[in-house]
Structure formats: C-alpha cells, structure tokens
Amino acid sequence: MATKNRKTETPTMAGLAEAMMTPGPEAMQAWQEILSDWGRFYADRLQQDLETQRAMLACKSPADLMQVQAEFYQKALQQYSEQGMRMMQKIVDASAQTTKGLHGARKYDDVPL
C-alpha cells in the first residue's frame, strides 16, 4: 500500500482533505438535508409512479392510455428537472459550508511586482 508524501502536498490540499474528513456541524447539517430532501423526492415520485400505474390500468381506450402517459412523462420531466436544480444549489451550499474557512497558504496580492 502506497503512503502519501505529506511534504509534496500543498497546504491548500492538506487543509481541504482535513476539512472534508472532519466537517463542522453546519456542513453535516447541510449534507443531511441533501440526503433527506432526496429521500422525500424519491418517495414522492414512487407514489406518483404507483398512481400513474393505477390510472393506466383503468384506461378504457388507447387514447386514454396515451393521455395518462403523456401527462406522467411531462410531470416527471418537470419534477426531475426542478429537483436537479435544487440539489445542485444545495450541493454548492453544502460544499461551501464544508470548505468554509479554508484558505491557501499564499495570498495572490503578496507577490511583489
């Protein structure tokens, strides 16, 4: 098993690795909310899938079936798209919480010209 050479790691990478391994309570809360939100979305979508299946079984004609399927796909596409956008924003926010307070060893304005 290879060992890491700590001398070659930059302070920023070492700090990031440490922060990711020991997140603060705010970061843990943010990531927990992401998991909870995704679980709620998944449960809701599963319920809607079952309701759609019942509606499809109750169809009396192919036209009725096509209508139910079209509504299902339109609604599912919209919901997955909205959930994806929400998740992306929550992940960005959680990542910011996880890395809050991390700064590199150098500031870019400390280099003499």
Image (cartoon, helix red, strand yellow):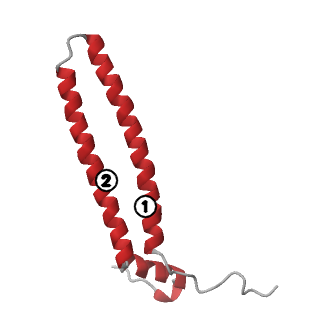
Which secondary structure, mark 2?
A: helix
Do tag 2 and tag 1 residues touch (Cβ < 8 Å)?
Answer: no
Which secondary structure, mark 1?
A: helix
Q: Quadrant of the C terminus?
A: bottom right
Classify 43 as above or below 19: above
Q: Residues within 10 Å of mark 2 (few under 14, many from 20)?
A: some
Residue 10 appears in the rendering = no
Classify 54 as above or below 107: above
The residue nearer to you, when weighing 4 against 61, is: 61
Give the image location of residue 43, x and y in percent: 23, 46
Q: Residue at x 25, y 44 (%)?
A: 44
Give the image location of residue 26, x and y in percent: 38, 74
The label on residue 91 is: 1
Q: Amino acid at mark 2?
A: Trp
Cα gap from disc 2 to disc 1, whole angstroms = 12 Å
Q: Earlier in the sequence, mark 2 or mark 1?
A: 2
Residue 60 appears in the rendering = yes
Q: Quadrant of the N terminus?
A: bottom left
Classify 67 as above or below 79: above
Looking at the image, residue 103 sits to the left or right of residue 99; the answer is right
Looking at the image, residue 31 sits to the left or right of residue 109; the answer is left
Q: Which residue is mark 2?
A: 38
Q: Residue at x 21, y 39 (%)?
A: 47
Q: Amino acid at mark 1?
A: Ile
Give the image location of residue 85, x and y in percent: 45, 49
Q: Quadrant of residue 82?
A: top left
